[in-house]
Every structure is written in C-alpha cells, then in structure tokens.
Amino acid sequence: MANTDLSNFHKPVLPSFFDGTDLRPEGLSREQIDFFRQNGFISGVPVLNYRQLGILREELALLMDPSLPPNPLFYEFHHNESSDPETVLFHALGAWRISPGFTTSFFCG
C-alpha cells in the first residue's frame, strides 16, 4: 500500500469499483418502512455486489498483513487487540486514506 493520501482525491479513485451492476433498490416496500418505524432498523437491503465485496476483502487482507510497514496515514493501527491468540481483532483508522477500494466505496450511493 502506497503512502499516497487518497483523501486528497474528490472523485472515485477506483473507477472499476462501479460496473453498472450496483445493487440500488428502487425503494423500500411498505412492509420494510413499517418494520423500520416499529423496530428502528431493517435488514436484507443489499448495498454492495459480490464483486465489490471481493475487492474490499482483498484490500482488507493486505491491510491486515502483520508484515505491513507502518504507514503515517493511519490515525491508529493495531494488528491484534484480542487477548485470544486464535482470534484477530484488527483495528485501523485511516484505511480509507490508503486503500483505493475503501476510499471508492464511500462514493456508493
């Protein structure tokens, strides 16, 4: 991952993230709206497609690599905050500044 600060770009930095198959619902059904009003949430509304998720998973795997050199664009970075050695609790603030997929995903919607 480069040290280029992607927060300086004001357009998608990974145009291939958008391929015309974005899952954009036309609107919520009356049942979904009623459920939201009663419960304060709804689920099952797609936001990203499988290809976009794949891009984000690949970039996350790179970000989680313990051999990743320190990057000054992270506000905070901890590879594992879990007390259980079998569980990784990854914490990184600022990934959107160095990861094209995470930066571009902010432009969805």
Image (cartoon, rainbow, N blue to C red):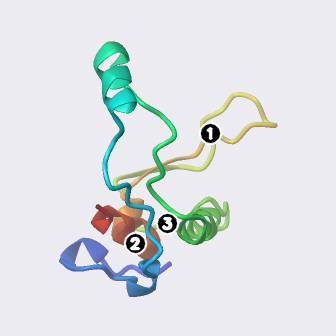
Which circle's residue, 3 or 2, is located before the other in the chain? Answer: 3
Task: Check disc 2 and report the residue beneath it.
Answer: 98
Residue at mark 1: 89
Marks 2 and 1: CB-CB under 8 Å?
Answer: no
User: Residue placed at 28% from the left, 61% from the top?
Assistant: 109
SS at mark 3?
loop
Residue at 20% across / 77% down in the picture?
A: 8
On screen, residue 83 versus residue 49, left or right, reads right
Q: Which of marks 3 and 1 is nearer the N terminus?
A: 3
Up the image or down, 44 lies above or below 26; here it is above
Relative to 42, does residue 80 appear above or below in the rendering?
Answer: below
| Lateral position of residue 90 relative to residue 32, left or right | right
Residue 7 position (above or below residue 43): below
Count of numbered labels shown in the rendering: 3
Instruction: Identify the residue at horizontal 38%, vertical 31% (top origin).
Output: 32
Q: Where is residue 97 in the image (x, y as percent from the top left)?
A: 34, 68
The mark that comes first in sequence, 2 or 1, is 1
Residue placed under numbered mark 3 in the picture:
70
**Distance between mark 3 and mark 1 Cα atoms:** 18 Å
> Which type of secondary structure does the marked residue at label 2 adopt?
loop
Residue drawn at x 47%, y 74% as measured from the top left: 21
Residue 84 occupies quadrant: top right
Question: Circle 1: is it few (<14), some (14-19), or many (20+) Cα within 10 Å?
Answer: some
SS at mark 1 in the image: loop
Residue 103 seen anywhere in this rendered image of the structure: yes
Label 3 vs label 2, nearer the camera: 2
Instruction: Specify the amino acid type for callout 3.
Output: Pro
Residue 63, percent across and down?
A: 56, 64
The residues bearing labels 3 and 2 have C-alpha atoms spaced at a distance of 12 Å
Q: Nearer the viewer, mark 3 or mark 1?
A: 1
Crowding at dot 2, Cα within 10 Å, few <14 / some 14-19 / many 20+, comes out as: many
- Label 1 near label 3: C-beta < 8 Å? no
